[in-house]
Amino acid sequence: MYVGQRMTLNPITASPETTHSQAYKLMRDHDIRHLPVVDRDKLVGFVVEEDLLRAQPSAATTLSIYEVYSLLDKLKLKEIMISPVYTVEENCPMEEAARIMQEYKISGLPVMRGERLMGIITEMDIFRAFIEVLGGSEQGLAFSVKLEDKPGALATVTRAVAAAGGNIISLVTFRAGERGTGEIYIKEKGADQEKLEELIREEAHADLLTIGPAHRVEPATFGKK
C-alpha cells in the first residue's frame, strides 16, 4: 500500500501572506487540520491546527477581545509556518510514512511529485488504512495464533481456515516476543469455529491464543455531558 493510493488529492493550500484568521477560517470551512503553504506554485511551509492555537495569546492575556482579533488579523503564516517541510513522494510505502510521522512527531506529510504538490497524507489516513488492513467492521470470526517463524508455517494456518469452510477477510503477521516465533491475527467469515480450532491445533500445530466473533465496539463514556 502506497501513499499515493491513500492521500488527499489537491489539498487546500494557503500562501505565506495568509493571515492567522484566514487560515483558521479555511480549516473550519473545509474541516481540515493541515495547510500546505505555497508561494508561486512552490511548497515553502506547512501549518497545522496546533500551530495556530500556539500562536494565539494565552487566556491570561490583558488584551481585549478586539485587540486579540486585530493581532491575529495581522499575523501571517510566514511568521509561524513550519519550514523546511518534511515531505514524501507518491510511491512511499504507507508504513514508511507512518514511521516518519512517528519519528519526527508530526501529524501530516505533503506528497510531492518532483517539486509539484500532489496531495497530503495525514495520521487519519494512516488510521483508516490500519482499520482496513485489520478488516474494519466486517463481521466474522477473529483469532490469533503463535507459530514457528519458518517457511510454510503460515500456509498451514490458512489451509486450516479453508478446510473449516472459512474465507479470510484480513491477515496480519508480526513478531512475537519469543525468539523464533511469530504471531498471526486473522479475521475470517464462514468457518465452523469448533472445526477451525481443532484444525489449528492438530493440523497446523499452532498455539491458538484468542478466538471469538468479531464485532463492532462502541466507546464507553465517563463524566458529565
Image (cartoon, rainbow, N blue to C red):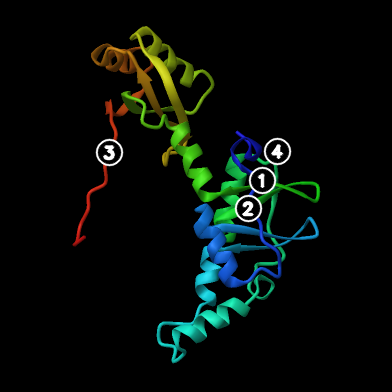
Residue 90, horizontal then vertical, whole percent: 70, 40
Instruction: Look at discs 2 and 3 and give the one toward the viewer.
Output: 2
The amino acid at mark 4 is: Asn
Indicate left or right for 6 with 86 as reference. left
Q: How far apart are marks 2 and 3 (CA)?
A: 33 Å
Q: How crowded is mark 1: few (under 14 residues within 10 Å), some or many (20 or more)?
A: few
Query: Taking the image as drawn, is residue 31 in sight?
Result: yes
Tell me the residue that label 2 is attached to. Answer: 12
Instruction: Look at discs 4 and 2 and give the one toward the viewer.
Output: 2
Q: Distance between the residues labelled 4 and 3?
A: 34 Å
Q: Which residue is drawn at 42% across and 39% down?
A: 178
Quadrant where the image shows the N terminus: top right
The amino acid at mark 3 is: Val
Asked if the residue at tag 3 contacts the one at tag 4, i.e. Cβ–Cβ closer than 8 Å, the answer is no
Q: Which residue is drawn at 63% across and 73% down?
A: 80
Instruction: Look at discs 1 and 3 and give the one toward the viewer.
Output: 1
The amino acid at mark 1 is: Asn
Q: Earlier in the sequence, mark 1 or mark 4?
A: 1
The amino acid at mark 2 is: Ile
Q: Distance between the residues labelled 2 and 1?
A: 7 Å
In the image, is residue 103 above or below residue 161? below
Tell me the residue that label 4 is attached to. Answer: 91
As helix, strand or loop, the secondary structure at mark 3 comes to loop
Q: Residue 67 carries which label?
A: none
In the image, is residue 55 above or below residue 201? below
Instruction: Look at discs 1 and 4 and give the one toward the viewer.
Output: 1
Residue 132, horizontal then vertical, whole percent: 46, 33
Asked if the residue at tag 2 contacts the one at tag 4, i.e. Cβ–Cβ closer than 8 Å, the answer is no
Q: Which mark is residue 10?
A: 1
